[in-house]
Every structure is written in C-alpha cells, then in structure tokens.
Image (tube, grey):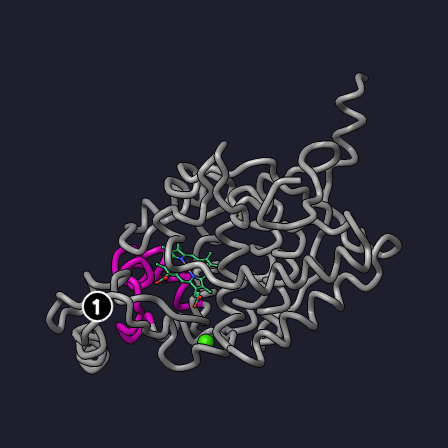
C-alpha cells in the first residue's frame, strides 16, 4: 500500500467536522441566513442557487472576483447580472474568521447556507457534510459550459448532469429548487412566443407577456413558482402539469419526455417523496468535485485566494 491510499481515506466529507474546532459555525451561518431571508425572502433562493452554481466542483470558486491571472465565474453567462447573495456569504465569513480563524471554508459555508435556506423556506433538513477546501482559481469557461441554460432540451439537461455524476432522477429532483425565487424575462422569452399551445396556460402566458413587454422588459422578474415563490414545497411540479412552468427547460420536463413526466407526476402527488429525493440529491451534488485534505485552502476572504 502506498501513501496515496492512506491519504484517500481522509478525503471524505464528514458531518460534525467543526464540532471541536468551531462549534458555533453552524449556528452563526444559520443566524445570518435567517436574518437575510427575513429582510428579503428571495435571498433563500439566491443562496440555494449560489451553491448549485459553485458545485459541479463545490470549491468556492464561484465566489472569487476576477484577478490579473484569471477571469472568475461571476461574468459567465449563467451568472452575470443574476447570481446574488455574495454579501451574505462575506458577512458569514467575516464573523467566522473572527470566531475561529482559518477553519471553515467558503465552500462549506455555501453548502450550509443552501441547506439553511431550504429549511427556513419550509423544506426538508439534512446534516451537511463538511470538509470542502476552497479553490486556488476559477474557470469562467467551465462555468459557461457546465451549467445548463434555460433553453436546454431534456437530453441536454440529462447530459449536463450526468457529466458531473448526477443521475436523471437527481436532475428532476434538483430542478424542484425552482419552487423558490425569480427569473428574468430574458431567460424565458421563448415561452412567450407560443400562442396557446398545449404546453402553456393562456392566462399565465398573457400575464408574462404583459410583464415582459414593459420598458426594461428583459430584466423584469417573474416567479419561478407563480403560486408559492417563497415556500419550499412541491408546487413547482404541480405548475408544470398545468402548463405554468416558467423556463422552457422546466416545462420541457413534462412536455418533451415521457420518463421525466412520470417523475414530475410522482413529485406533484407526493411532497414527501420530493423532499426525500431532493435532500439526497443535494447531498450528492454537495460532494461533487470537492477539494479535500491537502488540496485547496481555507480562504480568509471568500472573494480572493489567500
Ligand atoms: C435543471 C437545470 C437548470 C436550469 C436550466 C436552471 C436555470 C435557471 C435560470 C435561467 C434561472 C433564472 C436566472 C435569472 O433570470 O437571473 C434560475 C434561477 C434559479 N435556480 Fe435554476 N436552473 C437549473 C437547475 C437548478 C438547480 C439544480 C438549483 C438548485 C438546487 C437551482 C436553483 C435556482 C434558484 C433557487 C433560482 C432562483 C434564484 C433567485 O431568485 O435568486 N436551479 N435557474
Ligand atoms: Ca414554492
């Protein structure tokens, strides 16, 4: 046996990692998230999405500002003028650095804040596995290529998730995150062109057309879940069945593919099954491409490499 094998044993993420080194870590993160969401309920959605866009390699890379050496991920198409919540993460990091310096990584903060956002919005809870290290760089190109876009078809969505090790089922369960938050008109403009086709509800279409035809139309925001945008529930799937999915990639899950439709139906009927699968898929997503052991670092400021 060589040393690499021994190292490999220590690279697994674990719950309670900060039990001795920073016992207050989870409660500090929770308080900041709770406070931020009480001021702006959409922040729960934004923090959940921030973790998703960091993952496909959960290493805090999404938080890095551009430097002379690399262009960060913040200006990649899926992120530009869209990701929110960086100031909340900064505030959490700054308190954690004063309470227990160089201990809790930015990537772990993101994973924990995402879980807390779901809980505070009424969704399931789970134990977050910790021990991710923060990256030494970021890749705008990887963010651009890996993160699925709103006009992706079902086969493309499946492929993009499978590329990083997430299954068909994971993709559909994680899409249920669109039970929270907002999207800009520019992301669903192709939904507005259809007349009353089989995949879009007429009243819904007319409301969106009105919203998006205003001045500044492209940056106007619509609810991803028109019924309960601040509650983590299974309403997203129910909306898809009545042609009220916002993004083309959402509605495609019931319109374009028999198998995805079956899973959507099952989540629309059984909220607890959705919660259970969502939780497990979040745990899986949260462990993708993590840096552990001697790889990476614990950043002192999430926006810059130490
Ligand atoms: C299945 C493929 C996915 C696609 C194509 C997609 C696409 C999008 C787009 C285009 C927006 C609106 C962005 C804007 O207008 O600024 C959005 C918002 C959002 N996405 Fe996704 N997404 C996907 C999966 C996920 C996953 C897996 C999660 C989390 C687990 C997630 C969480 C969110 C949340 C919470 C929002 C609202 C954010 C806010 O209001 O700040 N999405 N998504
Ligand atoms: Ca909802």
Question: Residue 157 vs residue 11: left or right?
Answer: left
| Residue furthest right in the image | 20
Q: Give the dominant element type of the magenta stretch: helix, strand or loop.
A: helix
Give the residue at mark 1: 199
**Magenta stretch bounds:** 240-266
Q: Position of residue 209 (x, y in %)?
A: 18, 75
Q: Position of residue 125 (x, y in %)?
A: 66, 68
Secondary structure, mark 1, is loop
- Is 232 rendered above or below residue 203? above
Q: Image quadrant for the N terminus?
A: top right
Residue at 51% from the left image edge and 41% from the top image edge:
165
- Is 181 rendered above or below residue 74? below
Question: From the Cβ of disc 1, is ligand 1 less than 8 Å away?
Answer: no
Is residue 149 covered in magenta? Answer: no
Q: Image quadrant for the C terminus?
A: top right
Q: Could you say which is closer to the camera, residue 144 or residue 167? A: 144
Q: Could you say which is closer to the camera, residue 96 or residue 170? A: 96
Residue 88, located in which quarter of the rendered image? bottom right
Question: Residue 88 vs residue 214: left or right?
Answer: right
Residue 11, located in which quarter of the rendered image? top right
Q: Could you say which is closer to the camera, residue 288 or residue 165? A: 288
Q: Residues within 10 Å of mark 1 (few under 14, many from 20)?
A: many
| Residue furthest front in the image | 68
Q: Could you say which is closer to the camera, residue 281 or residue 21? A: 21
Residue at 30% from the left image edge and 68% from the top image edge:
246
Where does ligand 2 appear, by image quarter? bottom left
| Residue furthest top in the image | 2
Residue at 40% from the left image edge and 53% from the top image edge:
79
Question: Residue 115 vs residue 5: left or right?
Answer: left
Q: Position of residue 108 (x, y in %)?
A: 67, 52
Residue at 59% from the left image edge and 74% from the top image edge:
36
């Amino acid at each position: 046996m060589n040393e690499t094998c021994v190292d490999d044993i220590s690279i697994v993420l674990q719950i309670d990692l900060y039990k001795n080194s920073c016992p207050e870590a989870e409660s500090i993160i929770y308080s900041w998230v709770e406070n931020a969401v009480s001021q702006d309920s959409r922040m729960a959605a934004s923090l959940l999405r921030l973790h998703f866009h960091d993952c496909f390699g959960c290493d805090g890379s999404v938080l890095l500002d551009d430097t002379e050496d690399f262009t960060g991920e913040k200006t990649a198409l899926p992120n530009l003028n869209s990701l929110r919540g960086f100031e909340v993460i900064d505030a959490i990091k700054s308190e954690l650095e004063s309470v227990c310096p160089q201990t809790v990584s930015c990537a772990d903060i993101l994973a924990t804040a995402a879980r807390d956002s779901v809980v505070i919005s009424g969704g399931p809870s789970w134990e977050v596995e910790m021990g991710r290290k923060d990256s030494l760089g970021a890749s705008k190109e990887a963010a651009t290529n890996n993160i699925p876009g709103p006009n992706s078809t079902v086969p493309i969505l499946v492929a993009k998730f499978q590329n990083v090790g997430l299954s068909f089922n994971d993709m559909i369960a994680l899409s249920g995150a669109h039970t929270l938050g907002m999207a800009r008109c520019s992301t669903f403009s192709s939904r507005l062109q259809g007349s009353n086709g089989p995949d879009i509800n007429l009243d819904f279409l007319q409301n969106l057309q009105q919203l998006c035809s205003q001045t500044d139309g492209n940056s106007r925001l619509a609810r991803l879940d028109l019924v309960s945008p601040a509650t983590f529930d299974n309403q997203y799937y129910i909306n898809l069945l009545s042609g009220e999915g916002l993004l083309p990639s959402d509605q495609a899950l019931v319109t374009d593919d028999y198998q995805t439709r079956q899973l959507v139906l099952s989540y629309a009927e059984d909220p607890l099954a959705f919660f259970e699968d969502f939780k497990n898929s979040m745990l899986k997503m949260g462990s993708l491409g993590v840096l552990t052991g001697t790889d990476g670092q614990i950043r002192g400021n999430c926006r810059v490499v130490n």
